[in-house]
Amino acid sequence: MLTERIKTAAVAAALSLAAVHAAASTALGIDFDSMFNGRLKESDREILDSGGVVLRSVSSMKKLCVKDTEDTRLVTEPLRNILKSGYIAEIINFRPYEGNEDLVERIDEAMSDFLSYTEIPYWSEHEQAWFPLYNYAEVTETREQDGVKTIFETLEMDMFGRFHSRIDIENRGDTFVYRLRNTDKLKYKGIFTVIRPEKMQSVVAVFRLGKNWAIYAVGGANVIRPPFISERVEPAFTGRVKAFADFVFSRIDSSGGKVESAMDKSDASRD
């Protein structure tokens, strides 16, 4: 049953992608210079200005394409001393504020549906097949203090097994921040430790930029890289980041469509 749902979701995503691109004919008028540095390509600007999603795989935080601003620090500051290098994915999307006044509420609802994480379709480059992003998800504890909702969860991925995670969500109405981190080690096939506690983290932020909402996220992992598994870990990690981003964007799209972009790995080489 789950496999059929994943296949159906994948087919629906492919069909809706063409419709979304056809509809996105009006430029958003994004103030790129206020947020981005020279690493954002002209082709990326065109994608973003048409409502598309840019996904970049980079090898270090210094290769991110954003400037250091009050808004971008919502994402980069929690990760600065954790993801100095490794497998890092950067995700960017813009949506007009007009007609999307409730975007923060929609993205909060989508990302707080933790048990649905097991129904996110993930494409495995190695297996050339669709799998669930997480094989298992269980919320073990929830807390709320000073406007921050904290969720402790047990997750399972086929390559890394079960591990415990912590999610912090802060919804301030005009800004939204989501942070996910592992709280224990991840082992490859249950044998080799490849990620230590707190070394796999993702931060997603939503904030205003002029007449648009900006959705900006960075996910990364400092991975211990035995040579015989490194070629498996990179596509598995970046592919999972992309799958989660696609899931969130499809859930918050009020038209029911989906916007998607291929992963740009031109800055993914090691320093």
Image: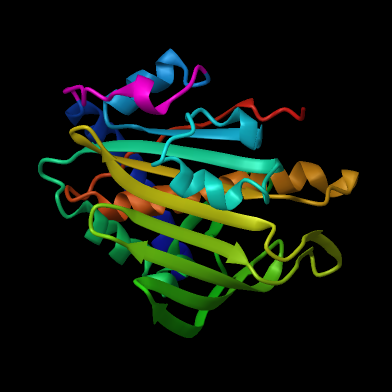
Give the side of residue 58 with respect to residue 8, left or right.
right
Is residue 34 a member of the stretch shown in magenta? Answer: yes
Q: Is residue 264 left or right of residue 28?
A: right
Quadrant housing residue 93 = top left
| The C terminus, quarter of image | top right
Q: If the image is split into quadrants, where does the N terminus sit?
A: bottom left
Residue 119: x, y in percent? 44, 65
- Is the residue 199 above or below the residue 266 in the image? below
Please state which of residues 74 and 232 is positioned toward the viewer in this rendering: 74
Residue drawn at (54%, 33%) of the image: 56
- Of residues 2 and 157, the one nearer the viewer is 157
50 left or right of 74 in image: left
Is residue 25 among the parts visible in the rendering? Answer: yes
Residue 16: give x, y in percent of width and height. Answer: 27, 41
Residue 61's spot in the image, x, y percent? 63, 37
Count of numbered circles in the view: 0
The residue that appears at 84% across and 47% down in the rendered structure is 225
Image height check: is 24 above or below 104? above
Residue 101, magenta (yes or no): no
Compared to 128, does 108 lie above or below? Answer: below
Q: Is residue 92 above or below residue 45?
A: below
- Residue 99 image position (x, y, % from top left): 10, 44
- The magenta-colored residue range is 25-38
Q: Residue at x 54, y 47 (%)?
A: 77
